[in-house]
Image (cartoon, grey):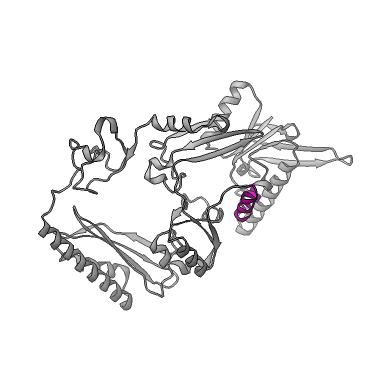
Amino acid sequence: MIIILTGPTDPHADAVIERLERRGAEYLRFDEGDYPARANLSFGCAPDGRTATILRTQERTVDLERVSTIWRRRPSPPEPPAAVQDPAWRRYVELECEAMLTAVWHTLPCRWLPAPTSVLRRADLKPLQLKLAAELGLELPPTLITSDPQAFLDFYREHDGDLVSKLLGTALTKALGGSQLARFTQRVTRRDVGYADSIRYAPMIFQAYVPKQVELRITVVGEQVFAAEIHSQKANRTRVDWRRYDMTHTLIIRTPCRTTSGAAARAGAAARPPLRRHRHGAHPRRQVRVPRDQPQRPVPVDRDEHGAADQRRDLRPAHGARGGLSAQEDDDMNSEISKTTIEILDEMVRLAGERLSPRDGERRLRQVARDKQGVELDVLWEQEAMNSGVHYDALLRVPGQGTVSVGYCPDRGVPGRCGARSAGARTRCCASTRSA
């Protein structure tokens, strides 16, 4: 018998179950979240060492001693019965039931995919995995795991700021419970460096950025090795972290590792035309191929048909683009946005000293831009719950020219960790105010 441990909504498990049913294989789909509210589990041991393990769900009773394979997919955590109301007792039931399930699964002499819980927990220890990878001869990118701001800054300078940051483990997912919020691997920005002091609150992983052409997702089952070649560089959203799925526009080639070759990879990549991304109005003086009804989607460009980028004279300009400006108009506009940028920054500093409410500060910033000809303003503010400090960010845009980003945070502020906002912070994103 095969047990599939997963939640009620899992299309991957659904696909496997469909094949198992076609083959007539015996299986049980079980979610640990049903225990103990909707399932019972018993383990017995006789004096001679013989054991009996019985699982009773709402549909059937299963002798777990007959299990030959367990696929630990994505089960929910144990859920106490509704009758247990007290938070402390509910937490006790959750932990006790988790311990029972883990103990019972480990008594079963069966195969596991990907591995028993104890092995999976060891695999989550990233420093240990890095050390083992090095011992096995794998080449590693320079890596720093730290909660020391100075160590991060030294590492940042050593690699000329070309770093990525990522979380150490799954603590964020567990702390947020059922929230859909996730934190992907991200490039470290100059703004992150300004927030370096907040690293002292929790450790993070920093690695030198490694440019890539493709990525391999490798799965080992017994002695069989399977690989999925992911062309993450074909879409902007997956360039740094392929888990930002863009399945529509990211080419994936599934093939066993033993049959993968450079020629096969190149043939697969050539089977699809290259992709280019543009936003309407982003490059008004360039000729780009962008359907009007798809302003932010990548569009295939066939170089054989359309020629090189500088030869595509017949392609229409981006939607909403203005004609080119004269040299004098261009100089006047650059001067205007430069003055506006300085005035906005001065106003941000004054607002921090006056400690106005974020809404009042927002109105003040909009008043500065309202008198500027042809400048559009977007304002974002964030207020810290712990000390009421306010961070302001302003985007100054001249249509057809470009955008300037201005940000300010007082020393008393406690900025969020690289790429994440602080707990308890309130944020608001405001609509554009246009001055014409």
**Highlighted range, magenta:** 120-136
User: Residue 112 at what x, y percent from top left?
Assistant: 67, 37
- Side of 5 relative to 214 (left or right): right
| Residue at (40% x, 75% y) in the render | 411
Please identify the dominant SS of the magenta region: helix
Asked where in the image residue 6 lies, by quadrant, the reply is top right
Q: Residue furthest right?
A: 48
How far across and down, in percent of the image, does residue 381 sit? 33, 64
Place of residue 191 in the rendered image (x, y in percent of width and height, measured from the top left): 38, 63
Is residue 328 shown left or right of residue 224? left
Q: Is residue 124 visible?
A: yes
Image quarter for residue 33? top right
Q: Is residue 247 left or right of residue 312?
A: right
**Is 194 located above or below residue 162 in the figure?**
below
Q: Quadrant of the C terminus?
A: bottom left
Give me the residue at 41% from left, 42% from top: 233
- Considering only vertical position in the picture, is 28 above or below 242? above
Q: In the picture provided, is 338 more to the left or to the right than 127? A: left
Q: Is residue 128 magenta?
A: yes
Name the quarter where the N terminus is drawn. Answer: top right
In this figure, what is the number of numbered marks?
A: 0
Query: Quarter of the image holding residue 357?
Result: bottom left
> Is-magenta flag for residue 382?
no
314 in relation to 325, above or below: above
Q: Determine the residue positioned at 37% across, 73% down.
A: 410
* Residue 367 seen in the current view: no
Q: Between residue 424 and residue 393, name the one nearer to us.
A: 393
